[in-house]
Image: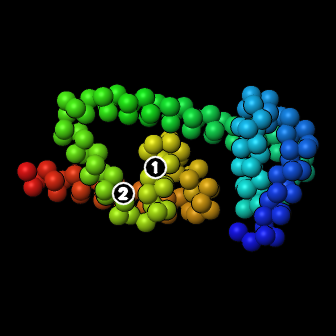
Amino acid sequence: MSSDADTTNNGLFDMLRELSIGRYAKRLANNQADADDLLQTVAEKLLRRPPTVQEPRHFLQRVVRNAAIDQHRARNVRADYESQAELQTAGLEQSPELALTLAQIQGALSTLPALTAEMFRLHYLDGLTQRAIAERFNVHVSSVEKRLTKARRRCLAAVEVETLGN
């Protein structure tokens, strides 16, 4: 990002933080660090697609609230995934086939473009919807669908090749 864009982003972030929107974000997030993350997310969204609204305070409160909900969902999904991963890791000694399959999937994902692998992670591990991913990367939902399909096929092919080889 250029320094002008950084300055604009920081200015918007500071403005959001100083307004009552900052207090609202802190109330939703329960701590300043998470509130700052929410405000940063909102600032990035606003810079990508500047809105034309009649009631900016209400609009900003709604955007911050939605970002807080997204953050909460992502944390829950991540916590669930991590606890499942811990359970699976504990069972890997008993199931070398599972360990091999996970390694094959990781290998398949490493051959994909970084954006495709990131979309796969956001959708399947973090629980984001295809629409949310499309908004995050400023692409069409159909692009996300195509990339996820490509990633799934690559993972399935990697697992099937190993299965057929045995």
Where on the picture, by quarter, is residue 139?
A: bottom right
Q: Is residue 93 above or below residue 99?
A: above
Q: Is residue 74 visible?
A: yes
Q: Nearer the viewer, residue 48 or 105?
A: 105
Which one is earlier in the sequence, the residue at label 2 or at label 1?
Answer: 2
Residue at the image position 86 percent from the left and 40 percent from the top = 21
Q: Is residue 149 above or below residue 21?
A: below
Q: Nearer the viewer, residue 49 or 24?
A: 24
Proximity of marks 2 and 1: CB atoms separated by less than 8 Å: yes
* Horizontal arrangement in the rendering, residue 60 relative to residue 147 (left or right): right
Residue at the image position 53 percent from the left and 46 percent from the top = 129
- Label 1 amino acid? Arg
Secondary structure of the residue carrying tag 2 is: helix
List the residue tagged with mark 2. Answer: 109
Residue at the image position 31 percent from the left and 56 percent from the top = 107
The percent position of residue 143, horizontal first and vertical second, equals 49, 63
Name the quarter where the N terminus is drawn: bottom right
> How far apart are labels 2 and 1 at the CA level?
9 Å
Secondary structure of the residue carrying tag 1 is: helix
Q: Which mark is residue 121?
A: 1
Circle 1 crowding by C-alpha within 10 Å: few under 14, some 14–19, many from 20: some
The percent position of residue 38, horizontal first and vertical second, equals 73, 43
The percent position of residue 78, horizontal first and vertical second, equals 50, 36
